[in-house]
Image (tube, grey):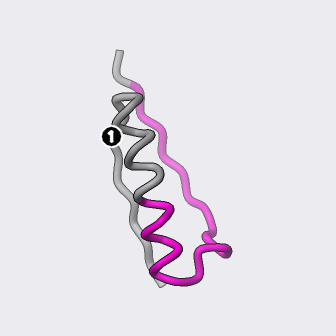
Amino acid sequence: MIKTICYISDALEYDSRDKLNVLYRETEVNNIKNNITGILICIN
């Protein structure tokens, strides 16, 4: 069964590109382990 989740959040603690890159790498590893795909859109 395919499930879709969509949400919007404020990334106040990820105020720099470096912090956002760390978040991306951590979630990428976890998503691969759990067979999760998705997209991250960041708008300043």
Asked if the stretch drawn in magenta spans residue 5, the answer is yes
Is 32 positioned to the left or the right of 44 in the image?
left
Seen at 41% across and 28% down, the residue is 34
- Above or below residue 11? Residue 25 is above
For the residue pair 20 and 39, the one nearer the viewer reads as 20
Q: Is residue 40 above or below residue 43?
A: above
Examine the image and state in which quarter residue 12 appears: bottom right
What residue do we see at 45% from left, 81% from top?
17
Which is more toward the observer, 5 or 20? 20
Say left or right for 13 vs 5.
right
Q: Range of the magenta residues? A: 3-24
Left or right: 29 in relation to 23 = left
Kindly indicate the quadrant of the structure image that contains residue 33: top left
Residue 36 part of the magenta-drawn span: no
Residue 40 on image: x %, y %: 39, 60
Residue 7 x, y percent position in the rendering: 54, 51
Q: Residue at x 59, y 74 (%)?
A: 14
Q: Position of residue 20 (x, y in %)?
A: 48, 71
Q: Is residue 37 left or right of residue 18?
A: left
The residue nearer to you, when weighing 4 against 35, is 35
Q: Which residue is mark 1?
A: 37
Q: Secondary structure at mark 1?
A: loop
Classify 40 as above or below 21: above
Q: Amino acid at mark 1?
A: Thr
Please name the residue shown 48% across and 38% down the image: 5
Residue 13, percent from left and from top? 67, 73
Which quadrant of the figure contains the N terminus? Answer: top left
Q: Give 25 or 5, whichever is nearer the viewer.
A: 25
Q: Main secondary structure of the magenta part?
A: loop
